[in-house]
Image: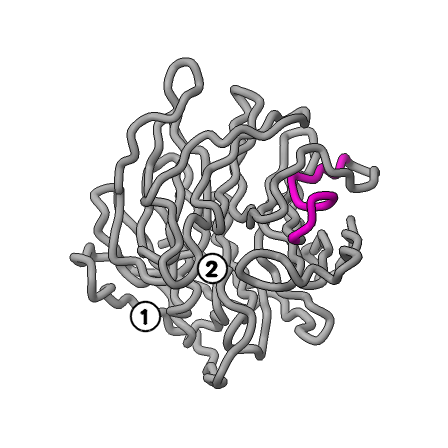
Amino acid sequence: MQSKHALMFAGLALSATVLTQTIPASAATPTSGFTKVRIAEHFDLATGQQPENIALEPRGAVDLNMSVARQVVRLYPDGRQQVLAQLPLPADGGVHTPLLGFPLLTGLVRDDDGTLYFLYATGTSDQTGLWRLRPGGTPERITALPANSLPNGLGLDPVRGELYSADSALSTVWRMPLSGGVATAWAGGPELAPQGSLGANGLKVHKDAVWVTNTSLGTIIRIPIRRHGAAGTFETKATGLPGIDDFAFIPGSDRIIATLDSQNKVAIVEPNGRSTIALTGRGGLENPTSIAVRGHTVYITSATWSLRKDPNLIIARLP
């Protein structure tokens, strides 16, 4: 998630051709990029339909956090949209939301039983935190986070029954019980700090570790989960990824697909840290924010934070 407003507009030309371009700050690893790239859905910028995060449903539908609209929306394969949740507007309008000045939905994950967990940042103590939506239910906040926090990426550890959130304002990773309750400041440090823009941003739990991006530094950090749950020593797994937002692991591997929001690109990051560009604005991207992968199918949300034209959902195929 990047800054809200743009100073200029850059037009995008849609193309079926996918570019594979080396990130200047990284050594290249050959890749064929994505294939069958298409914009599956266009959203309504005027109503705040700017998709910030995505979770996959079992039968082909996807769930999206429409950040500015403060909605959780289910998008079906036929294009039909269903609003699952509408979060309340803070009494002060959310003007004290850290770094942004407006309230928004951020991280989103789905548990195996269909329960959705998502983060809401408002700059107020009564609404900021982790929210839960059970199938057919209504949204409820189950864990409070500080009013001066900006909870962003969200990751699920189903084995331990915990959720982790990257805090873009407080340089912290929060740990929260899946059942709700008190949040713990699990990890923190300069590796997560903002420097000119957002700090800790995207987050995933993968192979007994929490992986976090730092947008300011263009890095991916791995934090081991120790035997008794404490955070281990930080390890920088990749650098040279300017404007990195959220990411996803390619199933069955340690390869990462990452969104470079401010660069309007999507990168493939190899386990050795080498990176290549797999998609650019010529493929339809407009400030990509998050990634989900189902088999060989890649889902990419574009929130158009700075380009301000076409928030969308792109679907592509891994080679």
**Would residue 251 be found to the left or right of residue 135 on screen?**
left
Asked if the magenta segment contains residue 124, the reply would be: yes
Q: Which mark is residue 19?
A: 1
Three-letter amino acid code at disc 1? Leu
Corner quadrant of residue 22: bottom left
Position in image of residue 198 (x %, y %) = 44, 57
Give the mark nearest the N terminus, 2 or 1: 1
Q: CA distance from mark 2 to mark 1?
A: 13 Å
**Residue found at the very far left of the displayed protein:** 27
Within 10 Å of the Cα at label 1, are there few (<14), some (14-19), or many (20+) other Cα atoms? some
Position in image of residue 209 (x %, y %) = 38, 29
Q: Is residue 34 visible?
A: no
Could you tell me which secondary element the residue under label 2 belongs to? strand
**Would residue 269 be found to the left or right of residue 314 on screen?**
left
| Position above or below: 50 against 87 | below
Position in image of residue 66 (x %, y %) = 66, 59
Q: Residue at x 68, y 27 (%)?
A: 180
Three-letter amino acid code at disc 2? Ala
The foreground one among 134 and 140 is 140
Residue designated by label 2: 316
The foreground one among 266 and 33 is 266
Corner quadrant of residue 90: bottom right
